Structures are given as C-alpha cells and as structure tokens.
C-alpha cells in the first residue's frame, strides 16, 4: 500500500480544567507526497484531454467520434467517485 502522507509533527496536550472533563488536544502537521497529485490529478486530466482532442482527428460523420467523446465524458464524471470510495 502506498502511503500518501508523512507526519512531520505530532503534539498531544492534556488539559485539566476544574469542574470539567479533561481535554486532550492532538495536533498533527502532515505533508502530502507530490506523487499523489501527479497520479491522481495531472495524469488523468492529460489523458482525458488527449481523448477529447483525439475525436477531432476522426471523420466528422463517424460514429466512433461520438462514442469516444461519450467515453471521455462519462469517465471524467465516474472516476472521482472511485477515488472517494463512494
């Protein structure tokens, strides 16, 4: 499994206030790895842009032109749902 973040700083503070419950405050400073953006944002955008532009290379009356455009549109809508795990 690829880890997308690194924990830079982890601070845990326990406070006790009179007449109240104790409070625990956890502060994390995370650093997201740059490959995350490359794999999940830049590569798919370039791929879908290439597919959308490739439809202009086909004949105007070709049915494949409509199918490729529909494929690019539907994939660009469905892909974020798979990333979120919905």
Image: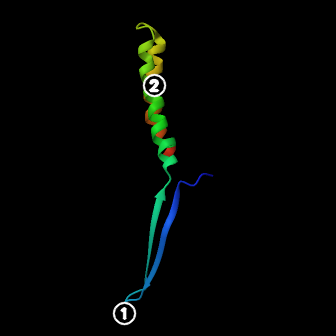
Q: Is residue 53 above or below residue 26?
A: above
Residue 18 is marked as 1
Instruction: Specify the label residue 58 is tagged with.
Output: none
In this rendering, position of residue 17 left or right of residue 9:
left
Question: In the structure shown, which secondary structural element does the residue marked by tag 2 occupy?
Answer: helix
Seen at 49% across and 14% down, the residue is 64
Examine the image and state in which quarter residue 46 appears: top left
- Up/down of 30 relative to 80, above or below: below
Q: Residue 58, located in which quarter of the rendered image?
A: top left
Residue 54 image offset from top left, x and y in percent: 45, 19
Regarding residue 79, the answer to whether it shows in the image is yes
| Marks 2 and 1, how far apart at CA | 63 Å
Badge 2 or badge 1: first in the primary sequence: 1
Q: Which residue is mark 2?
A: 50
Residue 51, compared with residue 33, is above or below; it is: above
Q: Residue furthest right?
A: 1
Q: Nearer the viewer, residue 43 or 68?
A: 43
Residue 33 x/y as whole percent: 50, 53
Helix, strand or loop at label 1? It is: loop
Few, some or many residues within 10 Å of mark 2 (<14, 14–19, 20+): few
Foreground mark, 2 or 1, reads 2
Q: Is residue 85 visible?
A: no
- The residue drawn where x is 43% and y is 21% is 69
Residue 50 on image: x %, y %: 45, 25
Q: Who's the residue at 52% across and 60% down the image?
A: 6
Q: Is residue 79 above or below residue 60?
A: below
What number of labels is visible? 2
């Amino acid at each position: 499994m690829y880890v997308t973040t690194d924990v830079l700083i982890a601070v845990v503070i326990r406070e006790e206030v009179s007449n109240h419950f104790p409070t625990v405050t956890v502060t994390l400073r995370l650093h997201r790895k740059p490959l995350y953006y490359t794999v999940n944002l830049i590569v798919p955008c370039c791929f879908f842009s290439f597919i959308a532009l490739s439809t202009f290379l086909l004949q105007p009356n070709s049915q494949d032109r409509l199918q490729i455009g529909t494929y690019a549109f539907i994939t660009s809508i469905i892909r974020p749902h798979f990333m979120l795990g919905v």
